[in-house]
Image (cartoon, rainbow, N blue to C red):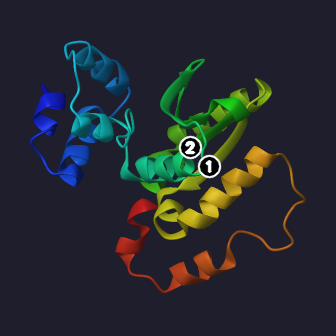
């Protein structure tokens, strides 16, 4: 059983192991099933449980989840609402967050179009949708978190300067591996 095996690992390895094992859309239900067989948790396991991110599909989703959780927000990962799965969901604020990569979300026309309809359906149903690239999470996490916190607080005037200028200027001179998470 993964939960018991994790007790014998150092913290970082245990977290990575549990997040991998309980990742994806069925991670939460698998985790809950496994938890039902354990009567008492050690202090180490209780600590690990407070640090793992269940259901996530990518490192970028986990990083953003942790950053938002650190800000005191309740965050759900890989949540199905209606016909769609969303990477992150802030239920108190009805904010849906997608962490996209160009390779998966924009390279195929079908996926590109589906993502637009998915977002439109959410907005019409009363949700707010925010999208960030994996590259933004990797290189501009603090700015991404501030953007989400602004959405949590309500509305704000449109900015006078567009997307983080330094982020896009910085990217122009970067090697191809920089774009790995775009």
x, y percent for residue 155: 86, 49
Is 71 in front, or is 178? 71
Q: Going 87% across and 72% down the picture, which residue do you hit?
A: 160
Which of marks 1 and 2 precedes in the sequence? 2
Give the SS element for disc 2: strand
Residues at marks 2 and 1, CA–CA distance in whole angstroms: 5 Å
x, y percent for residue 94: 71, 32
Return the residue at label 2.
98
Quarter holding the N terminus is top left
The image shows residue 112, relative to residue 85, as above or below, that is: below
The image shows residue 12, relative to residue 55, as above or below, that is: below
Q: Is residue 25 visible?
A: yes
Position of 106 compared to 37: left or right?
A: right
Return the residue at label 1.
131
Q: Is residue 94 visible?
A: no
Q: Going 56% across and 49% down the picture, which residue do you hit?
A: 68
Instruction: For the residues labelled 2 and 1, say whether their Cβ atoms are less than 8 Å apart.
Output: yes
x, y percent for residue 27: 33, 27
């Amino acid at each position: 059983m993964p939960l018991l095996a994790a007790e014998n690992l150092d913290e970082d390895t245990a977290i990575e192991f549990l997040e991998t094992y309980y990742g994806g859309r069925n991670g939460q239900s698998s985790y809950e099933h496994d938890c039902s067989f354990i009567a008492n948790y050690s202090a180490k396991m209780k600590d690990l449980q407070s640090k793992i991110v269940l259901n996530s599909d990518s490192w970028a989703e986990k990083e953003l989840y942790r950053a938002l959780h650190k800000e005191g927000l309740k965050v759900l990962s890989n949540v199905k609402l209606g016909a769609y799965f969303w990477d992150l969901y802030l239920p108190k604020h009805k904010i849906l967050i997608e962490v996209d990569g160009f390779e998966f979300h924009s390279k195929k026309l079908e996926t590109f179009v589906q993502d637009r309809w998915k977002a439109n359906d959410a907005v019409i149903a009363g949700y707010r949708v925010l999208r960030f690239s994996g590259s933004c999470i990797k290189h501009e996490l603090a700015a991404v978190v501030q953007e989400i916190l602004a959405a949590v607080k309500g509305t704000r005037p449109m900015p006078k300067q567009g997307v983080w200028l330094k982020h896009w200027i910085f990217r122009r001179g970067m090697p191809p591996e920089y774009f790995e998470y775009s």
